[in-house]
Image (cartoon, rainbow, N blue to C red):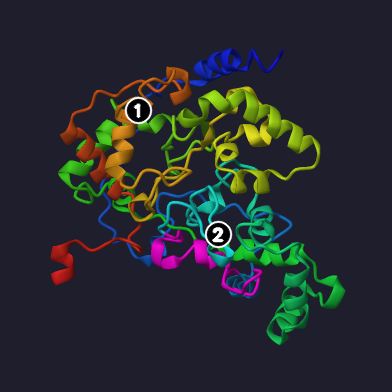
């Protein structure tokens, strides 16, 4: 009988889960500083990179991690490396709706950028891993990504490849059977922690006081972002830095609306499978409907059905398509989705709470364009796309 009551419980929990916009005013932009911004200022707008005490950074470890990150041999068909889904030419994404693994198999989730993943409090869209070390272990052994049955093929390569033998001995002081997947994951995570990217037009405008760093449309978009658009409620800005994520999980009406009739059956089946030893990453990446359960798949909490992690907006201009399922192709589509209260025309009959309780924003089309313009002000100078005028020059 408890599953018969589930839709009502979901309604109540998700409705309570909705929160109002942050009404506290943000601090004013800093006083203008004429100091030029150089590549050394790449951390402008970001806090210090958190480094685990049990995995300190060293140049040799970072270099080793870079090599491992790009090694295609860590997959069943020798075509899938970390870099396949997290390609630097796509701001460390792949530009696809959902990731493509070995033999062209597709999963259910969009590959998020690794840029600034060092600041994430949890990893993956559902937060199922607490750190980059844990995250790096999953894709090679997922049936639709790397396809390996276990980590042994990776260890065989790293224990016998001459480069890896020398590197792991130098970095960790291990070789042969002493070398474990934990050493591999620590090296990859160390490399990923170097992929930080601040110093956007917004950072220069807001934290450096360079009032000409953003265009008039971007400034208007920023005011909407912190005001009527309520974006800052989840994509947060602090006094001295901005990660543009609250690190929490929210149901915003993407995906969940299409499976609302299946929720009682799906949640029951998912919990039963977990109790029998089913692995969350395998279940959510091999079944589209199970994927839409979101954070619930990790916590078993009804209030988190359909909730996914707030992604950073930094470099968002470069990481299309958007949302956990890659279902929105452009930033304008994202703005329209929120403006409609999280319900598309195809979802007009769904209950409000399945859209996360999002209220329509009632913004005009020009205002939505200004918000899109502001999103483009969040691109790091390192990855900024030249305007036609800049390209001509």
Kindly tell me whether residue 202 is visible in this rendering: yes
Residue carrying label 1: 230
Which badge, 2 or 1, is on the more N-terminal residue? 2
Instruction: Tell me residue 86's x, y (percent).
Output: 50, 62
For the C terminus, give its image quadrant: bottom left
Q: Secondary structure at mark 1?
A: loop
Viewer-closest of 126 and 98: 98
Q: Do residues under tags 2 and 1 come within 8 Å of each other at their CB atoms?
A: no
Towards the viewer: 329 or 174? 329
Give the foreground label among 2 and 1.
2
Q: Residue 215: percent from the left, percent from the top? A: 18, 47
Q: Main secondary structure of the magenta part?
A: loop
Determine which quarter of the picture holds residue 56: bottom right
Q: Secondary structure at mark 2?
A: loop
Q: Residue at x 38, y 27 (%)?
A: 347
The picture quadrant where one finds residue 105 is: bottom right
Residue nearer the viewer, 360 or 218: 360
> Does residue 64 appear to the left or right of 307 in the view shown?
right
* Relative side of 234 to 38, left or right: right
Q: Which residues are magenta?
A: 69-94
- The x, y position of residue 194, in whole percent, is 53, 63
Does the magenta-highlighted stretch encompass residue 335?
A: no
| Quadrant housing residue 71 | bottom right
């Amino acid at each position: 009988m408890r599953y018969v009551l589930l839709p009502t419980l979901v309604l109540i929990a998700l409705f309570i889960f909705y929160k109002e916009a942050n009404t506290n005013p943000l601090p004013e932009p800093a006083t203008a500083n004429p100091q030029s911004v150089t590549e050394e200022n790449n951390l402008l707008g970001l806090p210090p990179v958190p480094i685990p005490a049990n995995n300190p950074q060293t140049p040799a470890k970072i270099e080793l991690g870079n090599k491992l990150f790009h090694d295609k041999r860590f997959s069943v068909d020798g075509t899938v490396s970390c870099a396949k889904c997290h390609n630097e030419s796509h701001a460390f994404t792949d530009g696809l709706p959902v990731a493509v693994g070995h033999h062209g198999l597709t999963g259910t989730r969009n590959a998020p950028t690794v840029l600034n993943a060092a600041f994430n409090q949890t990893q993956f869209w559902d937060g199922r891993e607490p750190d980059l070390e844990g995250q790096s272990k999953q894709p090679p052994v997922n049936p639709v990504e790397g396809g390996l049955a276990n980590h042994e093929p990776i260890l065989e390569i790293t224990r016998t490849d001459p480069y890896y033998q020398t590197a792991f001995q130098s970095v960790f002081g291990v070789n042969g059977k002493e070398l474990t997947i934990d050493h591999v994951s620590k090296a990859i995570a160390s490399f990923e922690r170097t992929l930080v990217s601040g110093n956007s037009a917004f950072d220069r405008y807001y934290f450096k006081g360079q009032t000409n760093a953003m265009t008039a449309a971007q400034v208007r978009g920023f005011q909407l972002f912190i005001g009527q658009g309520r974006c800052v409620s989840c994509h947060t800005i602090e006094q001295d830095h901005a990660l543009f994520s609250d690190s929490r999980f929210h149901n915003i009406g993407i995906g969940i609306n299409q499976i609302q009739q299946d929720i009682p059956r799906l949640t029951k089946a998912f919990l039963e499978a977990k109790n029998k030893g089913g692995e969350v990453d395998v279940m959510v990446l091999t079944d589209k409907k199970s994927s839409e359960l979101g954070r619930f798949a990790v916590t078993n909490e009804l209030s988190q059905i359909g909730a996914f992690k707030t992604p950073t907006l930094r470099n968002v201009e470069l990481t299309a398509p958007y949302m956990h399922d890659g279902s929105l192709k452009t930033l304008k589509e994202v703005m329209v989705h929120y403006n409609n209260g999280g319900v598309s025309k195809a979802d007009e009959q769904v209950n409000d709470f399945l859209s996360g309780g999002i209220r329509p924003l009632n913004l005009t089309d020009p205002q939505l364009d200004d918000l899109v313009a502001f999103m483009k002000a969040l691109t790091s100078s390192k990855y900024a796309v030249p305007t036609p005028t800049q390209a001509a020059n």
